[in-house]
Amino acid sequence: MLRIFGKIQRIGIITEPVPRLDEPALSEIGEQLAAHIGELFGGSLAIREVDAGSCNGCELEIHALDNPYYGIERFGVHFVASPRHADMLLVTGPVSRHMEAALRRTYDATPEPRLVIAVGECGANGGEFGTSYASCGAVSNVIPVDAVIRGCPPTPLDLMRGILEAIGRKT
Amino acid sequence: MTPTESFAPFLQRLAAADLICEQQAARGLAPAQLVAVQAEDWGRLGNEASVWGCRWVACWGEDVADAIRISACFEHAGAYLVARTAVPRATPALPSHTPSYPGADRPERHLRDMLGVVFTDHPDARRWTRHQAWKDSEYPLRRDFPAAGRPPAQTPADHQYNFLPAHGSGVYEIPVGPVHAGVIEPGHFRFQAVGETVLNLEERLGYVHKGIEKIAEGRDAGGLARLAGRVSGDSTVAHAWAACMAMEKAARVEVPQRALWLRALMCERERVANHVGDIGAMLNDIAFAFGFIQFARLREQWQRVSREAFGHRFMMDCIVPGGVGVDLDERFISAMRDEADALRKQIGKLMAIVNDLPSVADRVRGAGVLKPEYAKALGCVGYVGRASGMNFDVRRDAPYPPYDRLKVAVPLHHYGDVNARARTRLEEIAASFDLIEALLAGLPAGPIRAGWGAPAPGAEGLGLVEGWRGEIMTFVRFGEDGRIARFFPRDPSWTTWPALELLIHDNIVPDFPVCNKSVNGSYSGHDL
Ligand code: SF4
């Protein structure tokens, strides 16, 4: 136990206060995000992530939002296990036809007002997979989409910026 | 020993069993050997191969005008054999390999769904990859099936799949997915349990089937490399490498040394990133948040360096036909060496903490045991196989450049529990650090990309790469104008998904997440 505390103290807080690789600064995006979430969602934005056919690349970057560098939870954003608890759906991948019904049902289970963000090139326009016998392509071909976050995959900062823009547009 | 020599006793054995088998020029399939057999002997071939101790690697089919050509790949002591046969397109039936190799079950059902090949004595008549997006009378990989298909306006849910029923008092079912509670890929798990104990788990996959094999057709080499890099995003380097290796062998393109070394450097970086992230995720699944956060921190630092050096956090699209798309700046040679050193120390310190906690040991020791005989029967590769006594690694046993000039340490464990898989992965991280050091020290100078020349129509190639999940086998055939006629990537997850069903027996339901994470099969790489 002592060693755990020792480690925690030695590493200290690495959550980024200053820009390192990307502009604008993470903290800047985060603060705006927190402000908007405060106004619109009572301080807490619940996101249900739906992989509707992704290659799993986008999921890795969405995961990264929870690592201590980005620590998206501190801005009031958290990922929930059920669409019934969600304010927002973050949908990745070209929608595979085998996931089409599941995505529609997840959308229907999300209470209104709900925001839908299509993530990645695939979510935006089908990406490398396009539309085919197996793929419906863009998320907007299946459910209404409020915003898209481009990139293959979008970086964690792109994701934070995209979420901010989407809720900003809602005001 | 050359492949010809190592399979010679096997071929003699086949001849003694009156199984006619004709050796053919392997060309782009080399170093694998190619033999043709009669369709009616296909099942006997599987049986003989199994008795002789071959591992069954994969099977795939190609629609060639009036016939369906079927190939199966076997491995024995690091040598590969591709067996091939053909069945008439109008009546495409042949015996199955599944009675001899349980691991052939789903791959053969995939082939049946995609090409309409009937395996006469296959023990399971249910579909596998097909849900409801195309009819059971349609076969997407047939030439007359358009890539756009004829899908219904809305594809209904696949609710008529016959899961194994469970009876008896106190037995209940837990259906999970396709949309899971966490940020993970979709698939369906059907648990049958008594109290907390899992009696049986049945997987239903195919939800992220994106038609990868079909939409590969007609692409040029660069387009195929991009698609291969998205077969499974966490293995983008390894899959792109396997596809490029197959294309380069078909086109007889000599890849410059520097490019090969850079590919290996990226591949080892990918291995470290995934193993580090997964060790943290496993700790998260046993509610040890400290470990999760620490390993997530290390993974993030590692990926940032990948981005600085290669321009992408996962090094996507960095491997291109003929070489690599980005060169490594000189300054990263010492920077990456220091980085690997620092990470090695950090992991050492963290593991000293983790290893000291009885509550961690209690959750991972004895959980999710995959018995060595099961791993062997399923032909499990990668860390899942190596934690259950399957002593195989393509980099060491069938070395491709630059690994033919490097020493690859391959960890091996036998107990097959979550702990053994975690240990294997930690030891693989250490082995990758040694490789990274050697790769940086020996990085040859010179060009990073060879010119690309379209191969002759019909040219084929086989790529074999040890990705972080294990052996990836990729088959490519070219058609007219340097366009792809067939692409078949076999992700190692095909061998480990069935293993998950077996290793979860008699474990408690709450241990499923950590058992699953310790295997970490790719849904996308499997569903294609
Ligand atoms: S956008 Fe790129 S990373 Fe995301 S699912 Fe599509 S191919 Fe994968």
Image (cartoon, coloured by chain):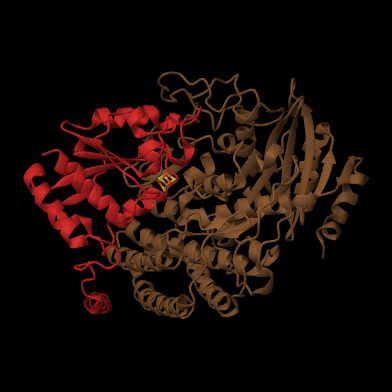
Chain colours: A red, B brown
* Residue A56 position in % (x across, y down): 42, 47
* Residue B162 position in % (x across, y down): 50, 26
Name the residue located 46 percent from the left edge and 31 percent from the top edge.
A131
Asked whether A139 or B509 is in front, the reply is: A139
State whether residue B226 is above or below residue B434. Answer: above
* Residue A95 position in % (x across, y down): 40, 34
Asked whether B40 or B287 is in front, the reply is: B40
Name the residue located 16 percent from the left edge and 45 percent from the top edge.
A45
* Residue B35 position in % (x across, y down): 83, 45
Residue B527 in view, yes or no = yes
Name the residue located 24 percent from the left edge and 30 percent from the top edge.
A109
State whether residue B352 is above or below residue B139. Answer: below
Left/right of residue B521 with respect to residue B320 in the rendered view: left
Asked whether B140 or B259 is in front, the reply is: B259
Residue B304 is drawn in which quadrant? bottom left
Number of residue marks: 0
Residue B479 in view, yes or no = no
Left/right of residue B499 with respect to residue B461 in the rendered view: left
Q: Quadrant of the N terminus of chain B?
A: bottom right
